[in-house]
Amino acid sequence: MTRNSTLIAAALTLGATTPAFAAGDVFFSLANTDFVVLIAFLLFIGVLFYFKVPGMLGGLLDKRAEGIQAELDEARALREEAQTLLASFERKQLEVQEQADRIVAQARESATEAAEQAKIDLAKSIERRLQGAEDQIASAEASAVKQVRDEAIRIAVGAAGEVISKDMKDARADDLINDAIETVRAKLH
C-alpha cells in the first residue's frame, strides 16, 4: 500500500464516522458539506505530499535544529572562554592584591624605619646642641673667671702698689712686689 492510498483510507474512515453518515443521509454527495470538506482536505494533503512539503518542512526543521545546535555549541564555547577569562582575571586580581599588600607592607616598614631614623637624628641633634651649649657655658664661665681673676689681680697689684709706695721703703717694696708677682704667677698657672 502506498502512502497516498493509506491517507485516502484514513479520510474515508473519518468521513464514515460523521453524523450525516450515521443518520442515513448520502455521504458521497456534493451536496453534503462534510464530503466536500473531506475531498478538499484530501486534495490539500495530496498537494502537500506531491510537492514534498513535509520533506521540505522536515529539512527546514533539521536546518533550524542544526542552527540551534550550532548556536548552543557556540554559546558553550563562549561560556568556556568566559570562564577561562574569569579565572584568568581572578588570578590577576589575586596577584595584584598580593602586590598591593606587599607595597603597603614595604611602605609601612619604610615609614617605621624613617621614623626611627628621625628619632635617632633628632636625639643626636639635641645632644650636639646641648654639648655646644655646655661648651659655650664652660667657655663663658672660664672667660668670666679669667676676667674676674685678671681684675682682682689688677686691683690687688694696684692696691699693693699704693700701699707699698706709701708705707714701704724701696728695698722692702721691691721684695714684696716680687713675692706678689710670684704668688700671682703660681695661682694663675
Image (spheres, rainbow, N blue to C red):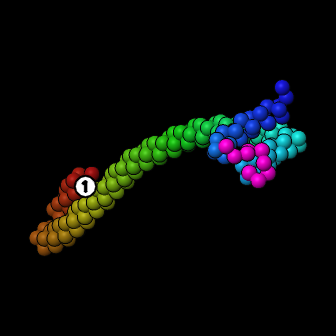
Of helix, strand and loop, which mostly describes the magenta segment? loop
Question: Residue at horizontal 76%, vertical 53%?
Answer: 31
**Closer to the camera, 180 or 78?**
78
Residue 68, magenta (yes or no): no
Secondary structure state at the residue bearing disc 1: helix
Question: Residue at horizontal 25%, vertical 64%?
Answer: 144
What residue sits right under mark 1 in the picture? 188
Q: Left or right: 104 with respect to 42?
A: left
Looking at the figure, which quarter contains the N terminus? top right
Does 111 appear above or below 143? above
Kind of residue sitting beneath label 1: Leu
Residue 30, magenta (yes or no): yes
Question: Residue at horizontal 77%, vertical 44%?
Answer: 28
Q: Which segment did they paint magenta?
A: 24-32
**Residue located farthest toward the right when viewing the structure as drawn:** 51
**Residue located farthest toward the left when viewing the structure as drawn:** 167
Does 83 appear above or below 39? above
| Quarter where residue 10 is shown | top right
**Residue located farthest toward the front when viewing the structure as drawn:** 24
Using the rendered image of the protein, determine whether residue 48 is visible from the camera's viewpoint. Answer: no
Q: Left or right: 26 with respect to 123?
A: right
